[in-house]
Amino acid sequence: MIAYTVVGTNDLEKSTAFYDALLGEIGGKRAMDLGGIILYAGAEGTPFFCIAKPIDGKEATVGNGSMVSFAAENPEAVDKLYAKALELGATDEGAPGPRSRGGLDFYAGYFRDPEGNKLNFFCM
């Protein structure tokens, strides 16, 4: 259903270095550079994840209530990837651990990238 997700950046070089290293940990790689928009691909047929300078030329800002979740194989992978994100300059938004919401049990670690975009690594 989802084709791609985009988060904004004001520093494309810094964000590209962050996501090259972080997404490389889960097999993601840079698929295209469209001049101000970088697309990352995972397994064939999965959605793209993109970072972009806003096309309108205005400053990128963080969306309140917006979040992107990356799939992890298991809780150990969530722990490792969350730690990698912090090592690369992300900030903690909720340490990895078991969670339950509305009858859904899962394991996740939440963080904000260097631009302030909220993301997590997640597994069931």
Image: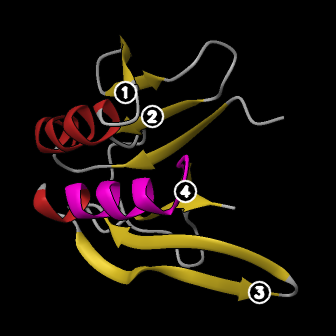
Where are the magenta residues, as a range? 71-84
Q: Residues within 10 Å of mark 4 (few under 14, many from 20)?
A: some
Separation of residues labelled 2 and 3 (CA atoms): 28 Å
Residues at marks 2 and 1 touching, judged by CB atoms closer than 8 Å: yes
- Disc on the earlier residue, 2 or 3: 2
Question: Is 35 left, or right, of 41 in this rendering?
Answer: left
Which of discs 4 and 2 lies nearer the camera? The answer is 4
Separation of residues labelled 1 and 3 (CA atoms): 34 Å
Q: Which mark is residue 50?
A: 2
Give the labeled residue for mark 3.
101
Separation of residues labelled 1 and 4 (CA atoms): 17 Å
Residues at marks 1 and 4 touching, judged by CB atoms closer than 8 Å: no
- Please identify the quarter of the rendering in which residue 53 is found: top left
Give the labeled residue for mark 4.
68
Amino acid carrying label 4: it is Val
- Disc on the earlier residue, 1 or 4: 1
Rendered residue at 16%/46% (across/down)? 11
The x and y percentages for residue 51 are 38, 38
Taking the image as drawn, is residue 59 in sight?
A: no
- Disc on the earlier residue, 3 or 4: 4
Which of discs 3 and 4 lies nearer the camera? The answer is 3
Residue 1 vertical placement versus 97 (above, below): above
